[in-house]
Amino acid sequence: MQTLSSNASFGGIQHVIQHPSTSCNCDMTFGLFLPEEARDGPVPVLWFLAGLTCTHENAMTKAGAQAWAAEQGIALVFPDTSPRGDSVADDDAYDLGKGAGFYVDATQEPWAANFQMWQYLSQELPDLLAAHFPLDMARQAITGHSMGGHGALTLAMRLPGRFASVSAFAPIAHPTASDWGRKQLTAYLGTNEASWQPHDATLLMREAGFDGPVLIDQGTDDQFLDLLMPEALSEAMAKRRQPGSFRMQPGYDHSYFFIASFMEEHVNFHADALWSI
Amino acid sequence: MQTLSSNASFGGIQHVIQHPSTSCNCDMTFGLFLPEEARDGPVPVLWFLAGLTCTHENAMTKAGAQAWAAEQGIALVFPDTSPRGDSVADDDAYDLGKGAGFYVDATQEPWAANFQMWQYLSQELPDLLAAHFPLDMARQAITGHSMGGHGALTLAMRLPGRFASVSAFAPIAHPTASDWGRKQLTAYLGTNEASWQPHDATLLMREAGFDGPVLIDQGTDDQFLDLLMPEALSEAMAKRRQPGSFRMQPGYDHSYFFIASFMEEHVNFHADALWSI
């Protein structure tokens, strides 16, 4: 494990760390923000999963999350969105291969050798964080943007008890019914659609929901609304009587300007849940 | 004039605008954040001048300024740091030519044809903003980072009455005595050092100071301390009895993580001055 950079940030430290990943068979990089309080002992953790084309860096530099995490005394983890390196399979399209792991464990060639992002995020990286950093792993929450919102929602619903709360910014809400999903799930998991079901937030919401509060923000002027399908998840939440809020935010698009605008409310939403455990 | 992008941000809008510049003889691009209040009438303006290698984009996406500007109801302008385009002279070094205009009007070849950033920022861009946007040009303030801190301080001190307040993050404080300065001032202005004096914040502070409040933040772990020479400006401020604060911030470096950490205080500092005009 190697610290690539450490920058003072809002009284805490923003680290970038690289480590060999056994899940993904390559070096993986993540950002870790530790608030000042982490000097005195373990602090709660909020995960931020990023969207298509992103690395660990986008949200770490553009979402403005550290300001609010520092105020609440919680850590932030910014994982990468896929395996990386010359030996890792890729595709010419921006929405498949590197930068587009979709938070699944691939079973199909040429992806299976490295694209094990579910295993990486549900087990390997939490274990590594717990072993090396002052993090209170009994207090975790998760959020994400677009493909990362899909990842956050599916991880939260399929790992009951792991996360106190889940939120998402413009998540890919129903990938088994969208071109942002069907293409990638076919490539990574094959044509048997039954294997896709555990990776669709709308289907998981219909089946089981989440045992905690949910907050979704979606811009009304998002250029990808047809691919994101917010209506499917919104309907499923209401039908299940899932505690939570699905907010259509007037005028906002799919950019980090949208994310930054509502980050304070998301961090505070998670802090409420994390500190009441 | 052409709007390249507009994104909803914190209840307002973040525009990116391109226009032909008569000062720089090329197309110039700038970011303009308008808070919600600008829909109802003119709002005050805070300028942010960026550092070496930056464009209009860096601070616009990484400094987190919109959150606080929106709260205070003030606009933000993010100019570029140099002329741009294939016909514009450049140098292989990162600290000369494109991305390194140093906020001067070049008199030397090959720079004089385009590198007229002082004229552009002191006259052309303010005129354009006043003509086309709901900005209260009687209420302006200015800040910047590194080379942009140098630009902010020199513009503020040499245009008395223009800016209500000036601040800087890790400014190049004494360029006539530093390798970040002597090289560029020689290239742009020639070897007659008398022509450099109006572009040195420390010398201007010694001579005249600023008719308003000054706020400087400088990280103690900044990797460029020897080039920035904060001690020269700090001494000059104290010697002149300049109203203001020069703060050495423990542990912070030269990055946007440092800038973002103190942006709230800088925006609020300027808002106090802008709203008391």
Image (cartoon, coloured by chain):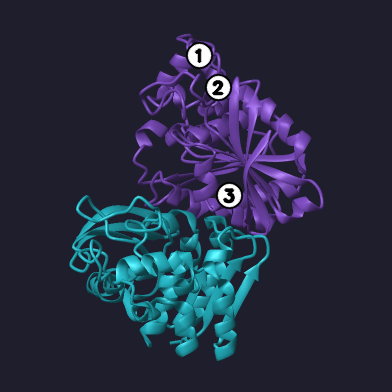
Chain colours: A cyan, B purple
When the figure is inspected, residue A251 is found, relative to residue A43, above or below; the finding is: above
The local secondary structure at tag 3 comes to helix
Q: Amino acid at mark 1?
A: Leu
Q: Mark 1 highlights which residue?
A: B189
Residue A62: x and y in percent read: 48, 54
Residue B91: x and y in percent read: 39, 21
**Chain designation of label 2:** B
- What's the mark number on residue B126? none
Residue B20: x and y in percent read: 64, 26
Q: Mark 3 highlights which residue?
A: B266
Q: Amino acid at mark 3?
A: His
Give how far apart the Cα atoms at labels 2 and 1 are. Answer: 8 Å
- Looking at the image, which is closer to me, B115 or B195? B115
When the figure is inspected, residue B270 is found, relative to residue A115, above or below; the finding is: above
Location of residue A215 (image quadrant):
bottom right
- Looking at the image, which is closer to me, B136 or A194? A194
**Chain designation of label 1:** B
| Residue A72 visible somewhere in the drawing | yes
Give how far apart the Cα atoms at labels 3 and 2 are. Answer: 25 Å
Location of residue A128 (image quadrant):
bottom left
Q: Mark 2 highlights which residue?
A: B104
